[in-house]
Image (tube, rainbow, N blue to C red):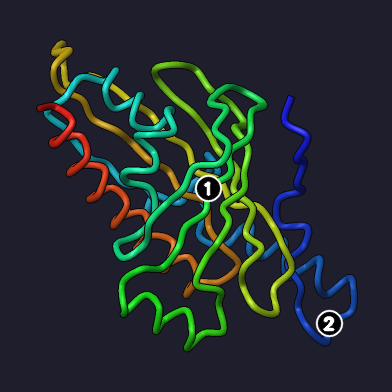
Amino acid sequence: MCPLTFVPWAGVEVFGARPVEQSLRVLSLLLEGLTMDGWDRDLTLERRYDVSPRNVWTAWSTADSVAAWWGPHGYSTTVQVLEARTGGCFQYVMTAVAPEQIRFADRHGLSRSTTVIGRFVDVVAPASLTIAQLVDFVPRVCAYEVSASLEVMPVRASQSKSRIRLKIGRMHDDQWTERSLDGWRAQLRRLAVHLRDSRG
């Protein structure tokens, strides 16, 4: 069992606000823009790949594969822990290596290296997983969790082609949510390249 337990959204801090006001702000963040099933349709990404669902699953669940594509363009990733099972943990270190990413980190007061820590909330191999990732790197914002839910499916009855549906949880504000979306889009582009190259 993963020893890390985080309370989603509990740490969002509104500076200068009393506790009740902070609680109301957190509630408004949770409700803003959500659909009835708890996910924002605008935060759902879908992709198709000319590889089997099993190959896609392997790309998400093994250390060597994750290291090859995780993180936005301009970052390298080292996988320190990856336990792709319900209750398991993951820990990756992403390091900015491209000049534009280094400048962005420096301009916004962020570290050039970020340790990504999270847990696997639910894993049904090889079809779906839900992760909760700790967000503890935003200046002046207390740590909280953000979720992502992946579904891996064959394209029609084919076992040689697949599609994914990735549902992404909102972050603490619209700007950071858009950054998260941009990051996931970039990661999925890197995933597509990795799947193509690993197909041989």
Query: Which residue is tagged 2?
Result: 17
What is the quadrant of residue 183 in the picture?
bottom left
Look at the numbered disc 2 and give the secondary structure of its residue: loop
Q: Residues within 10 Å of mark 1 (few under 14, many from 20)?
A: many
Instruction: Measure the C-alpha gap from mark 2 to mark 1.
Output: 34 Å
Judge from the rendering whether residue 91 lies leftward or rightward of residue 103; answer left or right.
right
Judge from the rendering whether residue 15 lies leftward or rightward of residue 72; answer left or right.
right
Q: Which mark is residue 65?
A: none
What is the quadrant of residue 87 in the picture?
top right
The residue nearer to you, when weighing 30 against 79, is 79
Image quarter of the C terminus: top left
The residue nearer to you, when weighing 18 against 182, is 182
Amino acid type assigned to the residue bearing label 1 in the image = Tyr
Look at the numbered disc 1 and give the secondary structure of its residue: strand
- Residue 134 pos. (x, y %): 64, 53
Say which residue appears at 83% left-offset and 75% top-offset.
21
The answer to whether mark 2 and mark 1 are in CB contact below 8 A is no
Say which residue appears at 52% left-offset and 39% top-offset.
37
The residue nearer to you, when weighing 160 against 43, is 160
Q: Residues within 10 Å of mark 2 (few under 14, many from 20)?
A: few
Say which residue appears at 53% left-offset and 26% top-offset.
84
- Residue 44 pos. (x, y %): 36, 47
Amino acid type assigned to the residue bearing label 2 in the image = Ala
- Residue 88 pos. (x, y %): 64, 28
Query: Which residue is tagged 1?
Result: 92
In the image, residue 95 above or below residue 92:
below
The residue nearer to you, when weighing 16 against 159, is 159
In the image, residue 53 above or below residue 151:
above
